[in-house]
Amino acid sequence: MNPERNESSSRRDHALLRRILLKLTATSRILSAALVVVVVLIWYDALNRLLAFGNGIDYAGNRIMGAEATALLQRYNPYFWGALVTLCSLLLAYLTWLAVRAILARARLRPVDPASFQQLADQLSKPSLDVLLWAWQTRDEPLRVGDLMQTRDELAAGRAARLHRAAEQLAVLENARRRQ
């Protein structure tokens, strides 16, 4: 196989996979980005209100605890509210991250539409088709977006060459077995 042709078909295959994956996952990516933006905007407003509330607390009128305890509360009050905001921010970031992962995982499970499937079948090179068939492990289910993502990743990692080597080794072993 000509290395230049293999490299150009590989680039063309990567571009085709990238274009189809972008089309199939655009909605979930936009939804994830919108979710992050909304959460950040709402949290920014909430944390400003929380910090303003914390800064507005005056412990001077507290007669129960004494002057030293009141001074201590007054001095460490900003740190308490800052720590509370930090903990809440970390929790919110983690929950947002989980939600984004769930949205993207759901997108991976979507079946590939027939037009995109036909485009892949018509335009992918033989080594890329071999990798696609390798990535599509559950053949009793339709091809899914996750299979295309795995194909893209495996093509970038050199799976086509490894599949070719494995086929050659299998042929050598079968020839050796026939000779015996």
Image (spheres, rainbow, N blue to C red):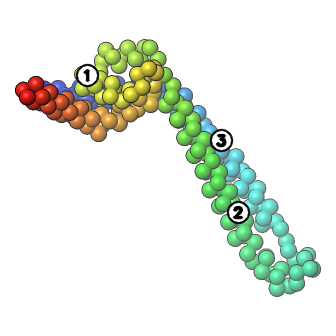
The numbered dot on residue 125 is 1
Q: Residue at x 62, y 56 (%)?
A: 90
Disc 3, SS: helix
Q: Nearer the viewer, mark 3 or mark 2?
A: 2
Task: Point out the tag, 3 or 1, that comes first from the N-terminus.
Answer: 3
Q: Amino acid at mark 3?
A: Val
The residue under label 2 is 84
Task: Point out the tag, 2 or 1, that comes first from the N-terminus.
Answer: 2
Q: Amino acid at mark 2?
A: Leu
Q: Quadrant of the N terminus?
A: top left
Task: Describe residue 126's horizontal placement relative to residue 144 as left or right.
Answer: left
Q: Nearer the viewer, mark 3 or mark 1?
A: 1
Label 1: few (<14), some (14–19) or many (≥20) C-alpha neighbours in 10 Å: some
Residue 37 position by quadrant:
top right
The residue under label 3 is 38
x%, y% of residue 103? 57, 35
Label 2: few (<14), some (14–19) or many (≥20) C-alpha neighbours in 10 Å: some
Task: Describe residue 106's horizontal placement relative to residue 146 as left or right.
Answer: right
Q: How much space separates mark 3 and mark 2, taking CA atoms? A: 21 Å
